[in-house]
Amino acid sequence: MALDERAFFAEKPETRPGRYQCPKCRRPGEYSIRWMRHSKKDRLPPGANEEDRAKFAKLRDYLLRLDDEVTCKACGKKFEIPSQHSLMFVDQLAGLPNEEELEREINIASGEPEPEPEKKPALPARFTRKSSGWK
């Protein structure tokens, strides 16, 4: 008898940030997306046959997205999350660079100098003086 997938994996809920653009107002936003992490167990369950052993050797940890829709923070409309990333393998996810590193690498490769962070203007003296209290 072949074993069920739940016998090979441990499930754990997880929340990860995702950046999506609302199709109605066209504003990008950062949203918390719920995922279910399926981690391969360290050993085969009892009662496994040769077919199950072969399957177990090929298994990888993965994330399965639970949320299909999010509500836009700007206009309040619900929109569907693109479905091409509803399942992600954890080993592929670990090797992806974050956005800041990617921008830095692109600037270095193109020969452009790195943009300096924006400097905030100094506050006028009236905002930095110590107050004398209420009169």
Image (tube, rainbow, N blue to C red):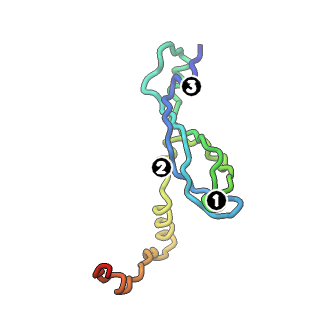
Q: Amino acid at mark 2?
A: Gly
Horizontal placement of 23 versus 56: left or right? right
Q: Which quadrant holds residue 89?
A: top right
- In the rendered structure, are the residues bearing label 2 and label 3 in contact, judged by CB atoms less than 8 Å apart? no
Mark 2 vs mark 3, foreground winner is 3
Q: CA distance from mark 1 to mark 2?
A: 24 Å
Secondary structure state at the residue bearing disc 1:
strand
The residue tagged 1 is 21
Q: CA distance from mark 2 to mark 3?
A: 26 Å
Q: CA distance from mark 3 to mark 1?
A: 34 Å
Horizontal placement of 129 versus 82: left or right? left
At a point 53% along the width and 30% down the height, the residue shown is: 58
Q: Amino acid at mark 1?
A: Gln
Q: Which mark is residue 5?
A: 3
Secondary structure state at the residue bearing disc 3:
helix
Q: Which mark is residue 95?
A: 2
